[in-house]
Image (cartoon, grey):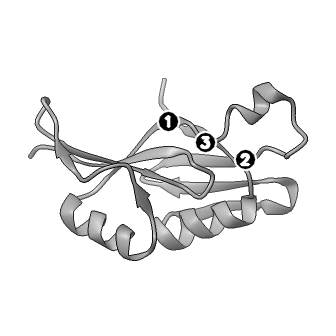
Amino acid sequence: MELSAVRLFVRDIAVAKAFYANVLGLTVASDGSKQGFCVFESAGIRLVVEAVPSDAPPHDQGLVGRFAGVSFAVANIALEHQRLLSLGVTFTGDPEPQSWGGILATFKDPSGNELNIVQYAT
C-alpha cells in the first residue's frame, strides 16, 4: 500500500489554485477548476483541492478552515518562512524546534486551512 493523495477542502477553487501553484510552487497535475477541483503533484504525492459550495450542508462546510495535518518539507525553514511571509502568507507562530528533532511552523491557506512547513533533522 502506498499513500497517493491527500484531499483538502476550500471555499474558492480559483484562489486556492493560485495559492498552491504560485505561492507554494506545486505543479498543477489536473486543472478541474471549472468542476470545482485541482490536483497538484509534489514528490509523487497528489494534493487534491476541492471547493465546498457556500450552500453545502453544515457537515461539508466544516471540512473547510481546519487543521489539515499536511506538512511540506523544506530544506531551510527560516528562509521558507520569510519567503512565505513576504508573499502575505499568515503563520500562527514562528518556526519552533520540536521534541523529535525537526522544526515546524503552521500557516494558513486562503480558506483558513492550517498546514505546516517542516525542516526534518538531518
Is 87 placed left or right of 101 in the picture? right
- At mark 1, the secondary structure is strand
Which residue sits at x=44%, y=46%?
Answer: 115
Q: Residues within 10 Å of mark 3 (few under 14, many from 20)?
A: some
Residue that extends furthest to the right in the rendered view of this protein: 55
Is residue 26 at all visible to an observer of this figure? yes
Which residue sits at x=45%, y=71%?
Answer: 88
**x and y, in percent, of residue 77 in the image:** 22, 58
- At mark 2, the secondary structure is strand
**x and y, in percent, of residue 29 in the image:** 63, 60
- The type of residue carrying mark 1 is Phe
**x and y, in percent, of residue 64 in the image:** 66, 40
The vertical placement of 58 against 15, above or below, is above
**x and y, in percent, of residue 78 in the image:** 19, 63
The mark found on residue 65 in the picture is 3
The label nearer to you, 1 versus 2, is 1
Is 13 placed left or right of 18 in the picture? right
Question: Residue tagged by mark 1?
Answer: 67
The mark found on residue 50 in the picture is 2
What whole-number distance in Å separates the C-alpha atoms at marks 2 and 3? 13 Å
- The type of residue carrying mark 2 is Glu
What whole-number distance in Å separates the C-alpha atoms at marks 1 and 2? 16 Å
Which residue sits at x=81%, y=28%?
Answer: 58
Quadrant of residue 110 within the rendered picture = bottom right
99 or 121, which lies in front? 99
Is 78 placed left or right of 40 in the picture? left
The mark found on residue 80 in the picture is none
- The type of residue carrying mark 3 is Gly
